[in-house]
Amino acid sequence: MEKTYEEINEKIKSGKAVVVTAEELIGLSEEKGLSRAAAEVDVVTTGTFAPMCSSGAFLSFGHTSPRIRMQKVWLNGVSAYAGIAAVDAYIGATEVPDDDPLNKNYPGGFPYGGGHVIQDLVAGRPIKLKALSYGTDCYPRKDIETEISLDEINEAILFNPRNAYQNYNCAVNLSDRTVYTYMGMLRPHMENANFSTSGQLSPLFKDPHLKAIGVGTKIFLGGGVGYVAWNGTQHSPSMLNIDGKEVCGSGGTLALIGDLKQMSPKWLAGLSILGYGASLAVGVGVPIPILNEESAYYAALKDEDLYAPVVNYGTDYPAREGKALCYVSYADLKSGKISVDDREVRTAPLSSIPKAREIAATLKAWILESGFLLTKPVKSLASPEDQIKLNFLNENKEKGV
Amino acid sequence: MKSKMIVLRFDMDTSVKPVIYRLVKDYDLVVNIAQANVNPQKRGKMVLEVSGEKCEEGLDYLRGLGVTVQSLDREIRRDEDKCFMCGACTGVCPTGALYLRHPSMEVAFDENNCIICGLCVKLCPVKAMEVRL
């Protein structure tokens, strides 16, 4: 049994497609068996809503009179990168105001940053724009302070260089002091453990060999329609063999793009992560076509089958030692406690499971009711078989220069 | 007997008096101090679990001294619109007042178990938890 994108899209157009969420597929597969579920189901929808720091937006403000080639730009006091042409800038999710006390008052609160600017923009709230320049013959103006809103500016393109991690570390802290990380507050001596994927609902978990998701895949992004633009930075998918179990590594990532003007503040939320910085929670949902039994097999993997590496963020992670203390299932992680070294450790998610579920259901409704069609990738992304290894950044003396 | 959680606020004069002793001795109340502190200006705050038949009389005694008595449930609030149910707070809440419902994984808040330690307020990435002091 093989289906094609064209056949599935024809079924969507004629209202005959069977579309289920990843969790519904799990139920269906348990009830009817994988083969029948694979034959019946055309599309599986996934979802995730979690902090995704490598996010931001390109903004193009419109020209002033006289013209300015904005060299430095601030939005609500948060610096945006303006080393691109004239009135374009990129606001990154983790940027914070120049006068933020940062971690001088440890742990810093980071009440407002780039993620909040993006959420305010999407919410239609006015944003203070300040820009400076050095003045040229063609762009004589040297400064401007005004207010902008999403409606008024010409373009606003969400472009997230690294989103939707395939899998992610479960963070613990084996040191003897509390640490404040992008994985939340971690108490000493492994008192708590935080994890951050939606497990059985997570997009790349359901397509670990990247056979369905590729450049051009049309997705749910921030409440609107977006696309996979490229692989995410640090994309290095892998499949590991841990005690005879096939475990999806953490390396697969996606770069995502979409028109910010049709997105929603509900699905792009500015975050203040104590002691770490500002960020953005991004809602992402990816439809996965069930082309054959293999794609159904992976899409039907459940929390019991999916494992996260437990990593010590007290000492190992900051020192770039990423070694896994052990692997724990998402079923255990979601139950509220895991067992590490025969010790029971309390767990908490940083990724909203209820919202992930809502995204998968929304995407399902878009396909069934609004004619959201699937796009066949125009270019495949590197898969685990490509065995991408990431380079490290070393100081010159380490290189022997 | 049903106990209740209350917040007491003391000024410079009352914070130095052994008022909890009087609650126990004179009003026969069962008290459990969940949190107590006095700032350098000698103003104090105490979170107290209290039960007993003469509970109201005891609290009236405190009010008579000028101690502010508030029910704890008016102290903390979750902004339901802001909370996106990530669950980060559930890992650090010391009393389990913030917890995950299974299998929905929705974040629930049981105000009765809250001792307003304020950890969730600092930690919540979208500032959905507010302590009204």
Image (tube, coloured by chain):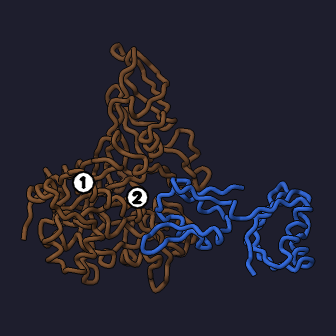
Chain colours: A brown, B blue
Q: Residue furthest bottom?
A: A342
Place residue B47 in its image quadrant.
Answer: bottom right
Q: Chain of mark 1?
A: A
* Side of B96 where A354 appears, left or right: left
The disc at residue A50 is 2
Neighbour class for label 2 at 10 Å: few (<14), some, many (≥20)? many
Percent position of residue A239, x then y: 23, 71
Residue at 47 percent of width and 35 percent of height: A75
**On the same chain: label 2 and label 1?**
yes
Residue at 22 percent of width and 65 percent of height: A207
Picture layout, residue B93 above or below residue A54? below
**As shown in the figure, which amino acid type bears the numbered disc 2?**
Ala
The disc at residue A369 is 1
**As shown in the figure, which amino acid type bears the numbered disc 1?**
Glu
Q: Residue furthest front?
A: A15
Q: CA distance from mark 2 to mark 1?
A: 26 Å
Residue at 51 percent of width and 73 percent of height: A192
| Res A340 visible | no
Mark 2 or 1 closer to N-term?
2
The disc at residue A38 is none
Q: Residue furthest left?
A: A1
Numbered disc 1: secondary structure = helix
